Image (cartoon, rainbow, N blue to C red):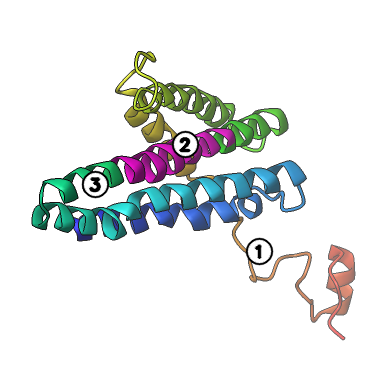
């Protein structure tokens, strides 16, 4: 289980490169709003990674102490478990991490719609995913504030739609220009015919 969480956490971290490269893929590296959103999205991934990796670096030692301890030790471990779960899981990984991810996807979606960088369906999908993902905060808040309305499927649906938007095939850097000669860049060896065709003459 420890190695499963380790792999899960670092697999999630693979979202960091495409998030950082998104301004380049959209051809808007100098857009200040897009740059700010990129760093917000990157922070969300780092926070989520910390939430995942607590199952590797924090939970196993607590579990060993609980199994080996007496009644007093187990009571102390119970308190430590709750503290780390609420801090590393509910607060950092889920509340802050997801909230920043929602802010990122909302901003990206609005930019796509307003500047027509991608098909409008991509921007609309992002807004829908953001709204559904935001509803997952109810499930997180219930861990600290009982009675908050929660929709258990919101996290799965929202993250799935968010992933679909992030993996859209057009979110890629433009392909390099072809190096094959064209009528505009090819040198022509026959001077008279080249001039007639409007092509550059080979010296």
Q: Which mark is residue 76?
A: 3
For residue 90, side relative to residue 47 (left or right): left
Which residue corresponds to the image point at 22% horizontal and 54% vertical from the top-left?
A: 62
Disc 2, SS: helix
Q: Nearer the viewer, residue 14 or 24?
A: 14
Q: Which residues are magenta?
A: 82-103
Which residue position holds label 2? Answer: 98
Depth check, mark 3 against mark 1: the one in front is 3
Mark 3 lies on a secondary structure that is: helix
Q: How crowded is the residue under tag 1: few (<14 C-alpha within 10 Å), some, or many (20+)?
A: few
| Residue at 59 percent of width and 27 percent of height | 120
Residue 117, quarter of picture: top right
Residue occupying image coordinates x 38% and y 51%: 12
Q: Residue at x 15, y 52 (%)?
A: 66
Distance from Cα at disc 3 to Cα at disc 2: 30 Å
The reply to whether residue 172 is in sight is no
Q: Position of residue 203 (x, y in %)?
A: 87, 86
Residue 191: image x %, image y %? 87, 78
Residue 150 or 76: which is nearer the viewer?
76
Residue 21, by quadrant, is bottom right
Answer whether labels 3 and 1 touch (C-beta < 8 Å).
no
Vertical position of residue 77 compared to residue 149: above or below: below
Instruction: Please report whichever mark, 3 or 2, sits nearer to the chain's N-terminal start.
Output: 3
Q: What secondary structure is the stretch in magenta mostly built from? A: helix
């Amino acid at each position: 289980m420890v190695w499963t969480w380790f792999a899960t956490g670092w697999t999630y971290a693979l979202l960091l490169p495409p998030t950082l490269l998104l301004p380049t893929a959209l051809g808007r590296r100098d857009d200040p709003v897009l740059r700010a959103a990129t760093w917000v999205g990157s922070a969300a991934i780092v926070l989520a990674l910390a939430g995942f990796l607590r199952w590797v670096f924090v939970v196993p030692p607590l579990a060993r102490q609980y199994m080996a301890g007496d009644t007093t030790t187990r009571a102390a471990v119970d308190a430590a478990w709750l503290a780390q779960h609420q801090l590393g899981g509910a607060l950092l990984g889920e509340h802050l991490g997801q909230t920043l991810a929602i802010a990122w996807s909302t901003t990206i979606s609005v930019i796509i719609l307003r500047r027509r960088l991608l098909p409008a369906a991509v921007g609309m999908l992002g807004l829908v995913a953001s709204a559904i993902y935001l509803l997952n905060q109810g499930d997180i808040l219930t861990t600290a504030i009982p009675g908050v309305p929660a929709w258990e499927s919101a996290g799965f649906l929202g993250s799935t739609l968010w992933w679909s938007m992030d993996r859209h095939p057009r979110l890629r850097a433009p392909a390099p220009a072809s190096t094959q000669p064209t009528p505009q860049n090819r040198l022509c060896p026959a001077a008279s015919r080249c001039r007639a065709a409007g092509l550059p003459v080979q010296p």
